[in-house]
Image (spheres, helix red, strand yellow):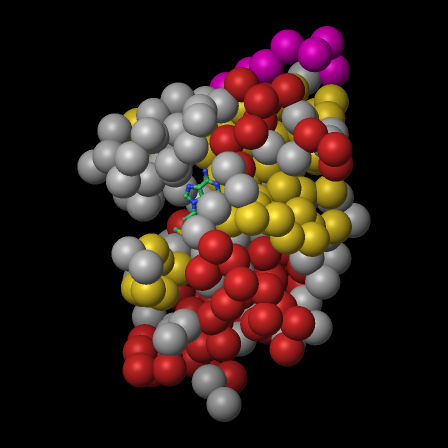
C-alpha cells in the first residue's frame, strides 16, 4: 500500500532540489504512514508536517530530506538525533545503514516510539532526556541532527562532533529559524553555513528554550 504515493513523493522532492540518491532511496523505502496517527494516515505522502499528538509534529518530508542531505553521510556513520518524535527521521537514517542514537524529552512520545521501533525492527539506541546536552558517553558523532528549533547552538553538541563531523540545527526565534550546518574541520575549528527559512517546534532544555 502507498507504493505509488512514495514514488510520487520522491519525484516531488527531486523536483524541489533533493539530489542525494541515498536520501531519495530511503524516502522511497520507509513507510511514512507507519509514523503517523491512524486518523490522518491518508496525508502521509503529502509534503507537509503533520501532528503526532502532545503538540508535536512529524517534520515535512522536504525538510527531513534536506537536513539529511546536509549531513553528507558516509556509510555506517554514527549519528545522533535530538528530538525522536514519531521516529521517521531515525528510521530513514537506520534504513541508510547508519548507527543511530536518538534522544526525546517527552516521556509519552518516547515510549510510544520505542514500541513502534520494536514492532518495525528498527534498531536505534534511544534515550529519554534533554538532548541539548547531547549523549556524552557515546560521543563523538559523525553527524548530529536537531529536529527542533533552538535559540542558540548548544555548546555540548559542538563538543560531541568528530573531526569532519557535521551538526545540522535550526536556530532562530520561535517563529522562524535558519538551518545551520556546523562542521568540525581537520584543525578542530568550526565552519558554518546557513540556509533560511524553516519553522520547527521549540527545542526545550538547558541549552535551548526554557519553555514551549
Ligand atoms: N524527528 C522527528 C520525526 O521524525 O518525527 C520530528 C520531531 S518534532 C519536530 C521535535 C521533537 O523534539 C518533539 O518530539 C519534541 O518533544 C522533541 N524535543 C524538544 N526539545 C527536546 C530536547 N531538549 N531534547 C530532546 N527532544 C526534544
Lateral position of residue 93 relative to residue 168, left or right = right
Name the foreground residue: 124 vs 47: 124
Q: Please say if 129 is above or below 189.
A: below
Query: Magenta residues, as a range?
Result: 186-192
Give how far across and how far down residue 207 sits, in percent: 44, 24
User: At 44% from the left edge and 51% from the top edge, which residue is drawn?
Assistant: 106
Q: Is residue 40 magenta?
A: no
- Does residue 24 show up? no
Name the foreground residue: 25 vs 122: 122
In this figure, what is the number of numbered marks? 0
- Does residue 211 show up? yes
Report which quarter residue 164 is drawn in.
top right
Give how far across and how far down residue 148 sits, in percent: 40, 42
Task: Give the residue furthest to the bottom.
Answer: 1
Name the foreground residue: 30 vs 8: 30
Quarter of the image containing the C terminus?
top left
User: At 73% from the left edge and 9% from the top edge, which residue is drawn?
Assistant: 187
Give how far across and how far down residue 95 sits, in percent: 67, 63
Report which quarter residue 145 is drawn in.
top right
Lateral position of residue 99 relative to residue 191, left or right = right
Report which quarter residue 162 is drawn in.
top right
Q: Please say if 9 is above or below 72.
A: below
Amino acid at each position: 500500500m502507498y507504493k505509488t504515493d512514495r514514488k510520487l513523493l520522491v519525484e516531488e522532492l527531486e523536483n524541489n532540489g533533493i539530489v542525494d540518491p541515498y536520501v531519495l532511496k530511503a524516502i522511497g523505502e520507509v513507510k511514512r504512514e507507519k509514523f503517523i496517527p491512524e486518523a490522518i494516515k491518508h496525508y502521509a505522502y503529502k509534503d507537509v508536517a503533520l501532528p503526532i499528538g502532545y503538540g508535536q509534529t512529524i517534520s515535512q518530508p522536504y525538510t527531513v530530506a534536506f537536513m539529511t542531505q546536509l549531513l553528507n553521510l558516509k556509510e555506517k556513520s554514527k549519528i545522533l538525533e535530538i528530538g525522536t518524535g514519531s521516529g521517521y527521521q531515525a528510521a530513514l537514517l537506520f534504513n541508510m545503514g547508519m548507527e543511530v542514537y536518538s534522544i526525546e524529552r517527552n516521556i509519552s512520545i518516547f515510549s510510544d516510539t520505542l514500541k513502534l521501533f520494536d514492532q518495525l525492527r528498527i534498531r536505534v539506541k534511544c534515550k529519554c532526556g534533554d538532548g541539548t546536552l547531547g549523549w556524552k558517553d557515546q560521543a563523538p558523532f559523525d553527524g548530529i541532527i536537531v529536529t527542533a528549533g533552538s535559540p542558540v547552538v548548544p555548546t555540548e553538541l559542538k563538543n560531541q562532533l568528530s573531526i569532519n563531523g557535521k551538526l545540522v540545527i535550526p536556530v532562530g526565534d520561535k517563529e522562524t529559524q535558519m538551518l545551520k550546518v556546523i562542521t568540525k574541520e581537520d584543525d578542530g575549528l568550526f565552519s558554518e553555513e546557513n540556509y533560511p527559512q524553516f519553522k520547527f517546534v521549540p527545542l526545550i532544555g538547558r541549552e535551548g528554550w526554557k519553555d514551549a
